Image (cartoon, rainbow, N blue to C red):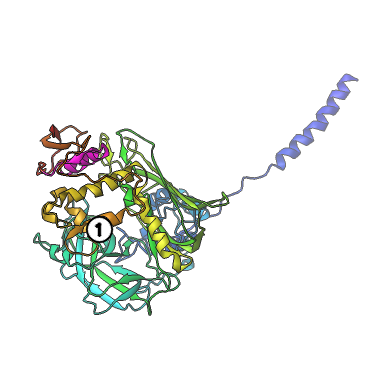
Amino acid sequence: MLKKITVSLIVLITPIAAFGQSEKPKKAQKKLVTFSEHIAPIIYQNCTSCHRKGQGAPFKLETYRDVRKRGQMIQHVVESRIMPPWHPSDGHGEFAGRRRMDPKDIQTLSDWVDSGMKRGDAKKAPALPHFPTGWSLGKPDLVVTMEKGFKIPAAGPDIYRNFVIPLNLKKDYWVKAVALRPSSPSVVHHVLFFLDESGKARKLDGASGQPGFSGMGFKRSGSLGGWAVGATPKKLPFDLARPLKQGSDLVIQSHFHPSGKVETEKTTIALYFAKKKPTRSLMNFQVPPLFGRFAGIDVPAGEKNFVIKDSFKVPVDIDLITVGAHAHYIARSMKAWAVLPNKTIKKLFYIGQWDFNWQEIYHYKTPTRVPAGSVIHVKLVYDNSADNPNNPFSPPRRIGWGLESTDEMGSVLFNAIPVRESEKAIFEKSARSQFFKGKGGQRLFQMLQQLKQFDLNKDGKVSRDELPKMYHGAIERLDNNNDGALDLVEIDSLGQKSAPSRTPKKVDEKKPAKNAKKKYYFSLIVDSSPEAPPCSKMSSSFSHSLFSRGAVLATAMTECKIVGERCRPEHLKTE
């Protein structure tokens, strides 16, 4: 009986096993991905506008052969979101002209590379896109070109150079957009557009024997935005436009990157004017202000997570029109958000992986309303470790705020309009008060007040000849009436009603005051240690530390004349 049952079980089990084997689902085969049907549309939509003949990208992506040759590299840069260049993260503001590739397209491209990069039926490939040969915004109102070309060497460090283009305008205009056409696209990385009403920049241009000049030795009277590789020019929305006054020179600040061969750049600029004066005022503000000059940017060597925070309370209802950011090499991320009066959080902007080489201004798809009483917060993060591939120093060294690209700075920049034009002055006053917030702002106010002591002839003005060399830049930046000097009224007006509550008391020079502040004198010696600051900045940075201690800076100081060295104070004498 036992034997019979056993046989029966075997008979029953065997067919079940056989049934299971015969019905096992087959592994789905991946769809064959080809260049002609699947990859060409992705490349043409996302890449070819820059990667074509006559544009700034270093190679073409127009044909199957072009794309196959660099297939693995393309796979890497799109999977890592290096390309297409679009740095704002989704969910932190909606922007016009978004260039972020769809995840499905990234996967398709990756599958094509992994499967051998087949061409497929060439007849099924779409036609190469047609790109306009003229200006993308139509016929410009004014086209100007650099008078002389500037030669860029085949190799070497990046070059920053200013060039003056006289506009010779006989009346005031309002600018809706600016477009740029480089003559040597492969060497031009980005360009900023400034205005100069004083004529100072024109005198500097060519003074060295070469076209243009370095640095910012003139007072900017306005800005018309900028241009970067891959950026598409856009007209300001509504009736918004930037002022362009009669007699202004256009100053273009160009960033050149050597391409491997000697090239000459002679940039052409197209200007588009508004038909009438705008009814709304476009205003800008930064958080933190002054590119973080007094925000405490001083990043120790090896520090991976150095954080700077700042905020701005919005005094009136505003609409944000554009947003951008600026920093140098060791910045890692930048985030901006608003806390509304009802405690709701509105995300405004976020770049999680900062890239010094891609600094754009982003236009909100629609104006972003920020009501009065809201607080706009900004968080900047810096990575000064050896793990940061963008770190300009190896091994890392302490990096503080400064104008050189190997220094640091940082700010989120907004362009906005007041909802009610009548409240423009209220907003401007509140934005100005940003300069005097916190310890850094108090130090700035003290510095401005200290400038008064240099009025040696007591004529109510501080002239360039009366100031130590380190302060000559103050004349260019703060001289509102362009008379070549700082009126004491001009100095006071910068901090009016927004300066710290404790203002310096007037001191009777004939009668020594009790607890009078001391005067400090110092000289400099060369110090090659990595921690020593550059000599060109030593006197300025050291005097700032004296101001923070409430000292009066002596006028008879030693000027630093050592170029390319690092140095420190050798001796301090007090009186």
Magenta-highlighted residues: 536-555
The residue that appears at 27% across and 70% down in the rendered structure is 269
Residue 485 falls left or right of residue 374: left
- Is residue 499 a member of the stretch shown in magenta? no
Q: Residue furthest top?
A: 2
Residue 357 appearing in the image: yes
Could you tell me what secondary structure mostly forms the magenta stretch?
A: helix
Residue 415 appearing in the image: no
- Say which amino acid is labelled 1: Val
User: The N terminus appears in which quarter of the rendering?
Assistant: top right
Q: Secondary structure at mark 1?
A: helix
Viewer-proximal residue among 315 and 396: 315
Measured as percent of width and height from the top left, residue 85 is found at 39, 55
Viewer-proximal residue among 456 and 230: 456
The residue that appears at 50% across and 53% down in the rendered structure is 374
- Is residue 545 a member of the stretch shown in magenta? yes
Disc 1 marks which residue?
A: 489
Viewer-proximal residue among 516 and 74: 516
Up-down: is 298 above or below 90? above
Counting the numbered discs, the total is: 1
Measured as percent of width and height from the top left, residue 541 is found at 22, 41
User: The C terminus appears in which quarter of the rendering?
Assistant: top left
